[in-house]
Image (tube, rainbow, N blue to C red):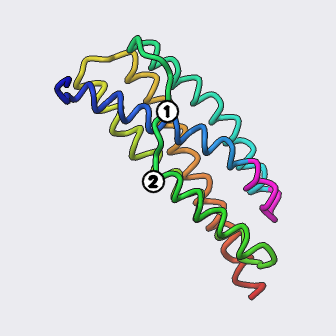
């Protein structure tokens, strides 16, 4: 059995986020269709386009490592996405739907930010400069998406959910 190293852990985590991004890409159109706010729909559609690019970047990192781009089942993202689906179904007719969708999306973003932040740091420690640069670009996009969703929630969605109650 091969020894477990930081490089092994890096690759394992890369496989985890690759799986996660592909699952997220499948979930975003459903979230966009379910959203009531046109701004939220547009945010989900924009993030779907970004997620496609993020998947391509992950494939670049796999190439840098000389390994095939293969995902590894990630129970964490499966659970987070399942909760989002639950919100879609349970609050479909509720004015609080968009607030719930944003909360679900923020959980996804925070998971992604944690994974990408860790991968960037490990890539630097492992002297994988090219991989770190590619992953840093995605980390910045995820941070921007997190901020945009929070601004949308604070700017209109949460108040609209409250006013309709």
93 vs 159, left or right, is right
Proximity of marks 2 and 1: CB atoms separated by less than 8 Å: no
Q: Quadrant of residue 14?
A: top left
Please report whichever mark, 2 or 1, sits nearer to the chain's N-terminal start: 1
CA neighbours of label 1 inside 10 A, class few (<14), some (14 to 19), many (20+):
some
Q: Is residue 36 magenta?
A: yes
Q: Quadrant of residue 149?
A: bottom right
SS for callout 1: loop
SS for callout 2: helix
94 vs 144, left or right, is right
Q: In which quarter of the image is residue 47?
A: top right
What label does residue 85 carry, if any? none
* Residue at 44% over, 45% down: 113
- In the picture of the structure, the residue carrying the numbered disc 2 is 76
- Residue 77: % across, % down: 50, 51
Residue 63, relative to residue 74: is it above or below?
above
**In this view, which residue lies farthest toward the bottom?**
165
Q: Secondary structure of the magenta portion, mostly? A: helix
Residue 148, relative to residue 95: is it above or below?
above
- Residue 138: % across, % down: 51, 33
Quadrant containing the N terminus in the rendered view: top left
- Residue 58: % across, % down: 50, 25
Q: Is residue 140 magenta?
A: no
* Residue at 49% over, 32% down: 71
- Residue 49: % across, % down: 70, 35
Q: Give the range drawn in magenta.
A: 29-38
What label does residue 71 carry, if any? 1
36 vs 129, left or right, is right
Cα–Cα gap, marks 2 and 1: 14 Å
Nearer to me, 48 or 18: 18
* Residue at 82% over, 55% down: 33
């Amino acid at each position: 059995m091969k020894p477990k190293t930081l490089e092994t852990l890096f690759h394992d985590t890369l496989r985890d986020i690759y799986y996660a991004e592909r699952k997220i890409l499948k979930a975003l159109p459903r979230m966009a269709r379910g959203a009531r706010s046109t701004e939220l729909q547009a945010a989900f559609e924009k993030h779907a386009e970004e997620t496609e690019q993020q998947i391509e970047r992950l494939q670049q990192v796999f190439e840098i490592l000389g390994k095939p781009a293969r995902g590894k089942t990630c129970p964490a993202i499966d659970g987070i996405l399942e909760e989002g689906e639950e919100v879609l179904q349970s609050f479909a007719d509720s004015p609080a739907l968009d607030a719930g969708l944003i909360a679900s999306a923020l959980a996804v973003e925070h998971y992604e930010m944690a994974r990408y932040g860790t991968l960037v740091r490990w890539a630097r420690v492992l002297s994988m400069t090219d991989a770190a640069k590619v992953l840093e670009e995605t980390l910045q996009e995820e941070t921007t998406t997190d901020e945009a969703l929070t601004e949308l929630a604070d700017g209109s969605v949460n108040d609209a959910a409250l006013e309709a109650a």
